[in-house]
Image (cartoon, rainbow, N blue to C red):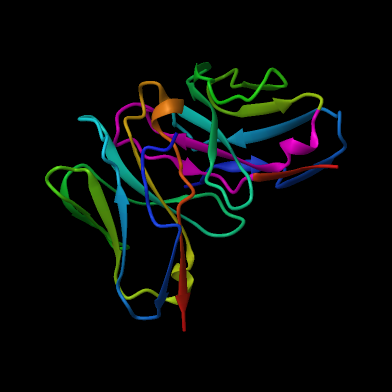
Amino acid sequence: GAGVSQTPSNKVTEKGKYVELRCDPISGHTALYWYRQSLGQGPEFLIYFQGTGAADDSGLPNDRFFAVRPEGSVSTLKIQRTERGDSAVYLCASSLTGSGGSDTQYFGPGTRLTVL
Amino acid sequence: LAKTTQPISMDSYEGQEVNITCSHNNIATNDYITWYQQFPSQGPRFIIQGYKTKVTNEVASLFIPADRKSSTLSLPRVSLSDTAVYYCLVGDQGKDYGQNFVFGPGTRLSVLP
């Protein structure tokens, strides 16, 4: 079946602009996760959804970052007033239940965001 | 703060067995151990997961001693295409996810011809 997809694959924007990054999880997966990854680093957790609600948003760096999942499927990560430091690869993952240590996350290919 | 410690890099040659050990001294009762592989310009890919003893699948084996304070990912007869970053994660995803399910810098495995 189809895996996690993310669009766009690349996004170049200017400092101060607003961007939206989209994630389509695996069908039927309840949990959805956003991470960002800088060069040479492991993925850094941003936010985790259980269904439509954000179960843990402790990783969002500041109030310029916001994410939604209105129907419990597709999610959008929104970044306002982008800064050069926001440049990174933004990864999305989904898992079947989001609970229990054995639940496996499946990652998308990521969106590479470049802020000029 | 990452709950795991693993080597930053390893080199190997084609056809050899590679063992990457991860330390997780503070592993909790409900925590599972999960390994991911990541190639450049791709998202991490699940390799194997275990709770205790030994787990084997078509790709790798995972050895977990009785005290569960460490685990070893074993890749049999590596090829050039196994060159990637390998992440060890320990956690119970449901509770306080952001604090409990943390990717460290991973182990960069280079397989040489």
Residue B65 counted in the magenta span: no
- Residue A68 place in picture, x, y as percent: 62, 20
Q: Position of residue A79 (x, y in %)?
A: 73, 27
Query: Where, by quadrant of the figure, is residue A20 drawn?
Result: top right
Compared to residue B27, the image places residue B106 above or below, namely: below
Q: Is residue A101 above or below residue A112?
A: above
Q: Quadrant of residue B40?
A: bottom right
Residue under the point 26% across and 56% down: B72
The part of the chain drawn in magenta is: A82-110
Is A78 or A29 nearer to us in this picture?
A78
Q: Classify residue B66 by image quadrant.
A: top left
Quadrant for the C terminus of chain A in the image:
top right
Left or right: residue A51 versus residue B40 is left
Residue B25 location in percent, x, y?
A: 26, 40
- Decide which of A11, B110 is in the foreground and name it: B110
Residue toward you, A55 or B24: B24
Side (left or right) of B82 relative to A22: left
Residue visible at 62% across and 56% down?
A: B41
Extreme residue in the left direction = B66
Q: Is residue A93 magenta?
A: yes
- Give left or right: position of B67 versus B95: left
